[in-house]
Image (tube, rainbow, N blue to C red):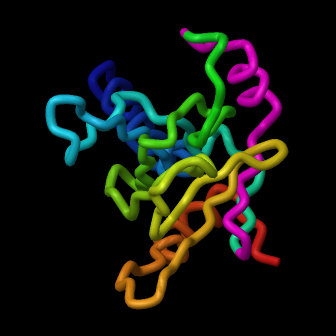
Amino acid sequence: MRVKSILIIVILLCILQGCSNDSEEISFEVYLGKEDLSNLKKYVISEEPLFTDRDIKAYDWKTHRIIFKKEFLNQKATQKNSDETKTYLGGSKLLNTNSRDRFIVYVNKEPIYEGFYMQSVLSSFYPVGATMVDVEGGVQITFNQVEGSHVMDKRNDERIYNRLNEKKILNKK
């Protein structure tokens, strides 16, 4: 009888584990790529994401504007920059990145696309492709195209759409 009871408990636990809510799992992440000073053509990907779907209040699919939750914004506001006198000439002040940094968008641990941060008006570098800029309450990922460029706009990847829609943070209007 005791073996039967233990077996029933184990089966119930397995069933409950199998029915766990997949939407609690982090599936949309944005990582920082820092320039490798030993090889300026390479980037080192951060171990921790800059932000995940848990930090996002809303993602506007039409404009690719990401509005963050107040908790995330408060956390970023309290984090002190190592150089408090830093002037932002490009990069993201909100995410504490530099103009030479990159960002990489992942869905389910798979890289979908990468892009640049807003550049200073003093910079001669014009980023072609996805570019992240600070906006009120979040960031927006724009797309810069130049004639003759063959860079594809991967911001509209269906894997991103599907995951953000499952998380109920997608604004499709």
- The image quarter containing residue 148 is bottom left
Find the magenta span and give its range.
62-82
Seen from the viewer's position, the closer of residues 67 and 95 is 95
- The image quarter containing residue 105 is bottom left
Q: Residue at x 66, y 38 (%)?
A: 55
Seen from the viewer's position, the closer of residues 46 and 165 is 46
Q: How many marks?
A: 0
Where residue 152 sits: x, y (%)?
41, 80
Where residue 8 sits: x, y (%)?
38, 34
Membership of 10 in magenta stretch:
no
The answer to whether 169 is drawn above or below residue 159 in the figure is above
The answer to whether 148 is drawn above or below residue 113 in the figure is below
Where residue 166 sits: x, y (%)?
62, 62
Q: Is 79 situated left or right of 136 in this image?
A: left
Q: Residue at x 48, y 46 (%)?
A: 29
Where residue 100 sits: x, y (%)?
43, 42
The answer to whether 30 is drawn above or below residue 171 in the figure is above
Membership of 74 in magenta stretch:
yes
Q: Residue at x 61, y 37 (%)?
A: 89
Seen from the viewer's position, the closer of residues 99 and 17 is 99
Seen from the viewer's position, the closer of residues 34 and 14 is 34
The answer to whether 88 is drawn above or below residue 138 in the figure is above
Q: Is 119 situated left or right of 5 in this image?
A: right
Q: Is 62 situated left or right of 136 in this image?
A: left
Quarter of the image with the C terminus is bottom right
Quarter of the image with the N terminus is top left
Q: Is 63 situated left or right of 20 in this image?
A: right
Q: Residue at x 41, y 54 (%)?
A: 106
Residue furthest to the bottom: 148
